[in-house]
Image (cartoon, rainbow, N blue to C red):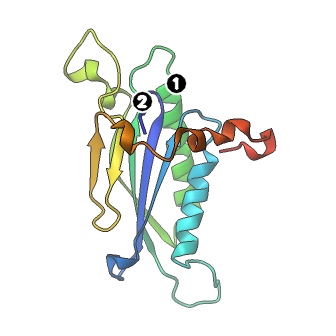
């Protein structure tokens, strides 16, 4: 997608000691501090996928290794990017505490707010995000930052990306 103050997160998980053929990848686009429950849902889905913590009586629980990649935001005047960054880290830290015996979460990429502002590096009089998206290869775990996103590669279709705008308030918590 094409992030400005928005943040794009990529998650990749596998079970420690197992080969990467059973890796799972997920992407999430956050454009406000009111829609962070998608992060929790993604982490829960990764845990379910790897069947961790499902049987509390099991003497040997699997440990999930989860790589987290975050890109987005810049030094915007109203500090929206900073608020979203703080919100993302708050959710991730709570999830890490909750799943601490079953989940090893590693922040692999973090290019947000001032670290992602063109004014910091190239054009002191300009302001705006350098990286606007991520490409995640689930098989290898390799991540590439995108400075632009070709309209043919944006997905899913714009109508699907905005479907939450039409959802009733009780279902619009992500």
User: In the picture shown, does residue 80 fall above or below 36?
Assistant: above
Q: How many discs appear?
A: 2
44 is higher (above) or lower (below) than 115: below
Question: Extreme left residue here?
Answer: 122
- Residue identified by numbered label 2: 73
Asked where in the image residue 21 lies, by quadrant, the reply is bottom left
Residue at disc 1, secondary structure = helix
Q: Residues within 10 Å of mark 2 (few under 14, many from 20)?
A: many
Identity of the residue drawn at 79% across and 40% down: 168
Which label was assigned to residue 80? Answer: 1
Residue at 36 percent of width and 34 percent of height = 132
Q: Name the quadrant of the C terminus.
A: top right
Question: What is the C-alpha distance between the residues marked 1 and 2?
Answer: 8 Å
Image quadrant in which you'd find residue 138: bottom left
Front residue of this view, candidates 22 and 156: 156
Q: Position of residue 12 (x, y in %)?
A: 40, 62
């Amino acid at each position: 997608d094409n992030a400005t103050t928005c943040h794009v997160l990529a998650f990749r998980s596998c079970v420690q000691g197992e080969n990467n053929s059973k890796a799972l990848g997920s992407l999430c686009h956050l454009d406000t501090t009111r829609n962070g429950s998608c992060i929790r849902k993604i982490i829960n889905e990764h845990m379910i996928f790897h069947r961790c913590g499902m049987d509390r009586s099991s003497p040997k629980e699997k440990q999930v290794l989860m790589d987290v990649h975050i890109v987005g935001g810049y030094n915007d005047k109203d500090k929206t990017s900073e608020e979203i960054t703080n919100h993302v880290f708050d959710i991730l830290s709570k999830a890490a505490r909750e799943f601490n015996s079953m989940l090893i979460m590693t922040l692999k990429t973090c290019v947000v707010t001032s670290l992602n502002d063109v004014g910091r590096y190239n054009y002191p009089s300009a302001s705006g995000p350098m990286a606007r998206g991520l490409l995640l290869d689930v098989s290898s775990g390799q991540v590439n930052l995108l400075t632009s996103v070709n309209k043919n590669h944006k997905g899913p279709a714009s109508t699907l990306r905005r479907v939450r705008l039409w959802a009733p308030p009780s279902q619009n918590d992500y």
